[in-house]
Image (tube, helix red, strand yellow):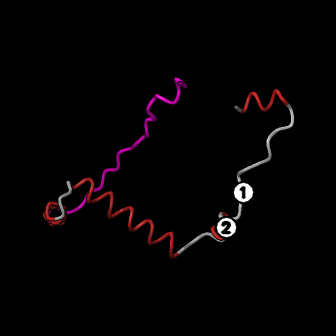
Amino acid sequence: MNPRASKRKHVKSDTLTVRIPGREKDVWQKVARRVGEDLSEFARKAVRQRVQAVQAEHSSPWDDLLGTVRTDAPPATNAKVRKAMA
């Protein structure tokens, strides 16, 4: 078994602090509780949805081309290269 395969990948994260009026935070918390989420998860999902909406509205001219790029390549002809890639 490959020892690297058993290791867990750690995803880096960062902290974003947002200053909002207290009344708005209270409303967010109530709504989050109603849907069974904590405030941080509720806020993350809201921001993620907003980012996706903006990206969909202002897509890159390259987006249409990204699906056409192929990542597979024919096998290397050099035995040493094949062994290194294995």
The relative height of residue 44 versus residue 8 in the rendered view (above or below) is below
Q: Which residue is mark 1?
A: 70
Q: Which region is colored magenta?
A: 1-23
Q: Which residue is mark 2?
A: 62
Residue 33 placement: quadrant:
bottom left
| Front residue of this view, candidates 63 and 68 | 68
Question: What amino acid is found at the position of numbered circle 1 in the picture?
Answer: Arg
Residue 34, image x and y in percent? 14, 65
Left or right? Give the position of 33 relative to 6.
left
Upstream in sequence: badge 1 or badge 2: 2
Is residue 5 rendered magenta in the image?
yes
Give the side of residue 78 with respect to residue 8, left or right.
Answer: right
- SS at badge 2: loop
How many marks do you count on the picture? 2
* Disc on res. 80: none
Indicate the position of residue 18 as horizontal and vertical percent values.
Answer: 30, 55
**Residue that extends furthest to the front in the rendered view of this protein:** 1
- Give the crowd class for mark 2: few <14, some 14-19, many >=20 residues within 10 Å: few
Q: Position of residue 12 (x, y in %)?
A: 43, 40
